[in-house]
Amino acid sequence: MRYVIIGNGPAGTAAVEGIREGDPRGSITVISDEGVANYSKPLLSYLLARKVKKNQLAHRPENFYARNGVELRLKKKAVKLEAEKRRVALSDGPPLSYDRLLIATGGAPLPLKIPGMKAQGVFTFTRLEEAEELIRYLKDHAVREAVVVGGGLIGLKATEGLLGRDVSVTLVELADRVLSATFDRRASEIIEGALKKEGCRVFLKNTVAKIVGDRSGRVKEVVLQNQRKVPCQVVIQAVGVLPNVGWLKGTEVRLDRGILVNEYLETTAEGVFAAGDCCQAPGFFGGPPGVFPIWPSAVRQGKVAGLNMAGGRKKYEGALVMNSVELCGIPTISVGLTDPREGNGFEIVESVNEKKGVYKKLVLRDDRIVGALFVGDISRAGVYTGLIKEAVRTGDLKGHLLKESFGLIHLPKDYRKHYVIGEGIEV
């Protein structure tokens, strides 16, 4: 069996492991348009802030590919799928034939469409090569001021990295708060306050209308939508990410916002699977399929796709939106539905300790936890995530859920067995 994986991110590497569980002998070829074996994108902001070195970015050991019998082809790009012939055309070299194909091409930054984008000093921040180019530019041009366009996770991590290099940062966000797609208003305000304490200027309900260059073609300022001018030598665009699927248009693979898949992560082309940020998959709570550009979903989808490529029939349980990130020294985690619209049967349980800077929130529906949001203290977050995944009824738990004393003893007896294992232990 010939397996080909396009993409070497978390979905692609997890797929290798899934394939090897079901087929220890088939050939596996992994294609990547990047020049390094593997790295953790969530660590790019730490590289920018000089908290980690390049050799600390890998999320798999050096011998991962050799140990799994993988042929890794770097700096190769898939440009055309010929599904009827079961082969993929590459940017150079002969086409690559397959019996089973996984498309895990990830996402690409959504470009700003404004005047001045071609000025020197405009960057994206989603790949290692982009981060390295930014770092070189910061050094070569003694950059003092930067503007980050976009207040989502990528924008905030870029902001944090720049602040760590003593660069003055202005963050511009079109919404009325940062992290509007991930956090509720209270959590967003906590993070915004922390950014401001670090010296970051935050402009909300605004965006960059124009980038202005100097005579040498380098960025010297941006003009905001409200006509305010902000001096800067670097602009980072972080307004969103789109599934990297343009090369599949006109093929047997059906597209919507991403690659449409069934519960086995199979596409509409025979023998072709998809996983990760390019994939439009079922959600954990049902509803229409969606694109879930987060690391845990990519890993899980890759693993399930790999198992099924090797002959399994593992159903994907649906993507549970989950983000765990530290921002300005504040640990945060969000799981599931964290900011639902009022009504629709949702119940909110909250705990706020302003003195300690701690905010905890649970979202319940039909006596089950469907969302959890923690800022400042993420202890026991794994327990709440487990309760969400297992759809455990809260019942009498409700009054204890956010108390400091909440723990194993409060969980339903039949559920405690998930956490306590050992001879002679009664749970």
Image (cartoon, helix red, strand yellow):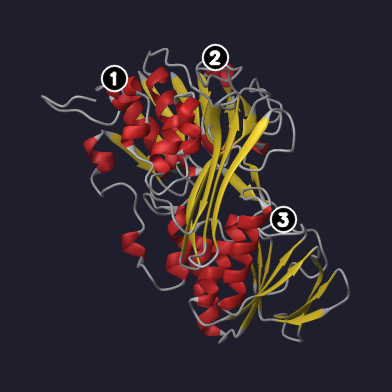
- Where is 21 relative to 295, above or below? above
Res. 231 image quadrant? bottom right
Secondary structure of the residue carrying numbered label 1 = loop
Asked if the residues shown at circle 2 and circle 3 are in contact, with their CB atoms under 8 angstroms apart, the answer is: no
Check whether the beta carbons of the residues at disc 1 and disc 2 lie within 8 A of each other: no
Name the residue at 62% across, 41% down: 244
Marks 2/3: CA distance? 33 Å
What's the residue at 69%, 61% (across, down)?
150
Name the amino acid type tagged 3.
Answer: Pro
* Quadrant of the frame with the N terminus: top left
Could you tell me residue 405's position as x and y percent? 37, 45
Mark 1, other Cα within 10 Å: few <14 / some 14–19 / many ≥20:
some
Please provide percent x and percent y for residue 69. 26, 33
Q: Amino acid at mark 2?
A: Glu
Q: Is residue 301 visible?
A: no
Mark 3: which secondary structure? Answer: loop
Residue 111 marker: 3
10 Å crowding of disc 3: few (<14), some (14-19), many (20+) = some
Residue 23 disc label: 1
The amino acid marked with disc number 1 is Asp
> Where's residue 224, x and y in %?
82, 72
- The mark nearer the N terminus, 2 or 3, is 3
Q: Is residue 229 visible?
A: yes
Position of residue 361 relative to residue 208, above or below, is above
Query: Toward which corner of the image does residue 54 lie, by quadrant?
Result: bottom left
> Disc 2 marks which residue?
270
For this orientation, the residue located farthest to the left is 423
The C terminus lies in which quarter of the figure? Answer: top left
Structural crowding at the residue carrying mark 2, measured as other residues with C-alpha within 10 Å and reported as few (<14), some (14–19) or many (≥20): some
